[in-house]
Amino acid sequence: MAKILIVDDSITSRKILKNILIENGHEVIGEAINGEDAISKFKELNPDIVTMDITMPVMDGLEALKKIMEINNSAKVVMVTAAGQKTKIVDAVKYGAVEFLTKPFESEQIIGIINKIQ
């Protein structure tokens, strides 16, 4: 099972995602509240997969994705998007994202993506 870092400024979103992942046998090895925090925890924890919210304060998910890909160009980053962020999805693919999750979360979608890329 995958070791996962969850990045989201919403405590509720992190909790929902964490519960779904743990219930399905994955290990959540860390949580980050913004892009800067994500980069620091990525270096420290070396997760198999990162789930990255796009819209966050301090540093957004796209900027953090770019920096994580500079650190490890084979990192597996799944972008978490709200409806209506199509242009940001295109940018995220350009920067190296491997997949996308859309809020609100659906357990089957999340686990399907994680199992596919791990």
Image (cartoon, grey):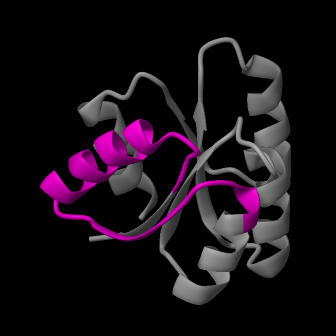
Quadrant (top left/top right/bottom left/bottom right) for the N terminus: bottom left
Residue 96, can we see it?
yes
Left or right position of 71 against 44: right
Left or right position of 97 against 3: right
Q: Position of residue 40 (x, y in %)?
A: 69, 77
Left or right position of 65 against 66: left
Image quarter of residue 111: top left
Quadrant (top left/top right/bottom left/bottom right) for the C terminus: bottom left
Left or right position of 74 against 94: left
Residue 32 against residue 48 in the figure, above or below: above
The residue furthest bottom is 44
Q: Position of residue 29 (x, y in %)?
A: 38, 74
Q: Position of residue 47 (x, y in %)?
A: 50, 76
The residue furthest top is 84
Residue 21 against residue 113 in the figure, above or below: below
Highlighted range, magenta:
7-36
Residue 112, can we see it?
no
Q: Residue shown at 56%/47% (left/top)?
A: 8
Number of numbered discs: 0
Q: Residue shown at 31%/52% (left/top)?
A: 18
Quick check: is 35 in the magenta stretch?
yes
Q: Position of residue 70 (x, y in %)?
A: 85, 74
Residue 87 against residue 5 in the figure, above or below: above
Quick check: is 37 in the magenta stretch?
no
Q: Residue shown at 42%/38% (left/top)?
A: 13
